[in-house]
């Protein structure tokens, strides 16, 4: 199986029979795979203190530590690692015990090497999917952080533009706009001066933004955004 451009799949083998362990190493070695073998479960745990694996293929019956006990130790430290149990003492109880302990699958001895290769391929595909999911989640997190940064930058820029537009206009009077606003409420004798002043400011700001756009001090997109905000203020009256 040719794998995508990821780091090699790291396969560890725990098998106490020297000859069979060597056969497994030679057979499972492929491009984009790193295969390492150990004589027993304790050697695996010791190596796990310094390095890690993606797929562990372990015999069920081994001296010092059997495959089920090794499975439990591995899953406690690395719950996302794939563990496959090999057993020559296959029974429903041992299979269920391995699956309940978090084993990905088990294979019964004696088995054909081609059967093992299919199982290993499926395990490798699972690992690649896990890696891809982690990569996508990392990219999503980075994208959200970048969007938050851009949002903060945009809000700051928006405040600066409003400050530039707002302050000069508050100090000026525009009789023409005052007359226009009065004409909006010809039958309303109680038209509040504060509300009228706010409407004047909005319209003056629109005019000033238009001047800034003509001078190319702000872009068309910025003008459109500010215009929508200001018109919304008028609509809410």
Image: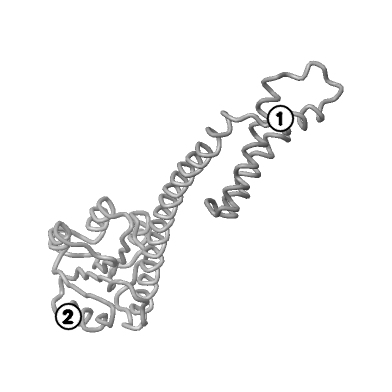
Mark 2 vs mark 1: in front: 1
| C-alpha distance separating marks 2 and 1 | 96 Å
Q: Residue furthest top?
A: 190
- How many marks the image carries: the answer is 2
- Tell me the residue at 23%/55% (across/down): 69
At label 2, counting other C-alpha atoms closer than 10 Å, the crowd grade (few under 14, some 14-19, many 20 or more) is few
Residue 86, position as x, y percentages in the image = 28, 69
State the image quarter where residue 83 is shown. Answer: bottom left
- Tell me the residue at 14%/59% (across/down): 50
- Tell me the residue at 64%/32% (across/down): 201
Say the numbered circle drawn on residue 175.
Answer: 1
Q: Secondary structure at mark 1?
A: helix
| Figure coloring | one colour
At label 1, counting other C-alpha atoms closer than 10 Å, the crowd grade (few under 14, some 14-19, many 20 or more) is few
CB within 8 Å, label 2 to label 1? no
Q: Nearer the viewer, residue 40 or 216?
A: 216
**Residue marked by disc 2:** 22
Say the numbered circle drawn on residue 207.
Answer: none
């Amino acid at each position: 199986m040719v794998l995508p451009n990821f780091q090699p799949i790291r396969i560890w083998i725990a098998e106490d029979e020297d000859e069979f362990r060597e056969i497994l190493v030679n057979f499972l070695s492929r491009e984009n795979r790193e295969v390492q073998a150990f004589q027993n479960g304790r050697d695996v745990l010791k190596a796990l203190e310094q390095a890690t694996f993606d797929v562990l293929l372990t015999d069920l019956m081994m001296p010092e530590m059997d495959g089920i006990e090794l499975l439990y130790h591995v899953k406690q430290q690395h719950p996302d690692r794939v563990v496959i149990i090999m057993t020559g003492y296959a029974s429903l109880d041992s299979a269920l015990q391995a699956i309940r302990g978090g084993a990905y699958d088990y294979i019964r001895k004696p088995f054909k090497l081609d059967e093992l290769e299919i199982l290993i391929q499926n395990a490798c595909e699972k690992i690649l999917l896990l890696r891809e999911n982690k990569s996508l989640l990392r990219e999503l997190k980075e994208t959200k952080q970048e969007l938050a940064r851009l949002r903060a930058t945009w809000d700051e820029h928006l405040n600066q533009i409003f400050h530039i537009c707002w302050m000069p206009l508050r100090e000026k009077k525009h009789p023409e706009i005052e007359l226009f606003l009065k004409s909006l409420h010809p039958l309303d004798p109680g038209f509040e001066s504060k509300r009228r002043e706010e409407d004047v400011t909005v319209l003056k700001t629109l005019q000033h933004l238009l001047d800034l756009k003509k001078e190319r001090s702000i872009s068309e997109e910025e003008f459109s955004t500010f215009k929508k905000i200001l018109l919304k203020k008028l609509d809410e009256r």
